[in-house]
Image (tube, rainbow, N blue to C red):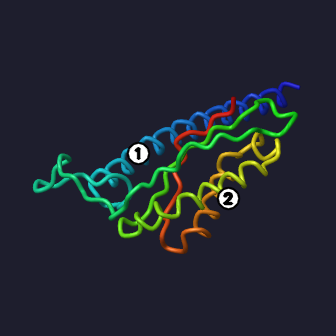
Amino acid sequence: MALAETIGTEAGESAKKSSKIALILSVVLCVAGGGLGFFALSSGLVPIGYAVPQETESYDEIIPLANVAFVEIPTLIVTLPPGAKNGHLRFTGLIEVPSEHQGDVEFLMPRIQDVLNGYLRALTIEDIEGPGALFKIRLQLFRRIVVVVGLGKANGLLVTEFILN
């Protein structure tokens, strides 16, 4: 039995040593990898993240965005179906449009309101209170806006108010 005990003790000690060495080696490699990654990003070797301004650039400069305008959708208040946790839905949003089409979209606002009102009134409880409801509703509303105004005249829908009360 003495021989078996000494073999078991030696095997246990070597396993402990190898696990400590592996742990130390992994920590050193993680720290080195993090440092190299930071260096690569901050020096611009990897083009990911925010650009560091050069001597001629500054953060104070305003970079003009695309030529866009925002058309406000007047507030829509919709009565929710029976059985819903809340009685009403209050919706307000903005339509992002190219500046040259702003007048066209404003002119079509009564039709846009009609389409959005009809869609919001047709929603079921599961549509409103389910997971990801706002995301799905926003997609459907934007799809209907594009049908009314035409392709290329609307870039997006920004929901500014979506209140269930």
Tag 2: amino acid = Gln
Q: Residue at x 47, y 45 (%)?
A: 29
Q: Position of residue 124 (x, y in %)?
A: 82, 46
Say which amino acid is labelled 1.
Ala
Q: Position of residue 155 (x, y in %)?
A: 48, 64
Q: Which residue is mark 1?
A: 32
13 sits left or right of 63 in the view: right
Front residue of this view, candidates 11 and 43: 43
**Mark 1 in CB contact with mark 2 (< 8 angstroms):** no
The image shows residue 17 at horizontal and vertical percentages of: 61, 34
Residue 92 is drawn in which quadrant? top right
Q: Nearer the viewer, residue 45 or 135?
A: 135
For the C terminus, the quadrant is top right
Identified at 36% across, 70% down, the residue is 100
61 or 67, which is in the foreground?
Answer: 67
Residue 140 is marked as 2
Mark 2 lies on a secondary structure that is helix
Q: What residue occupies the far bottom of the structure in this picture?
A: 151
Tell me: 47 left or right of 33.
left
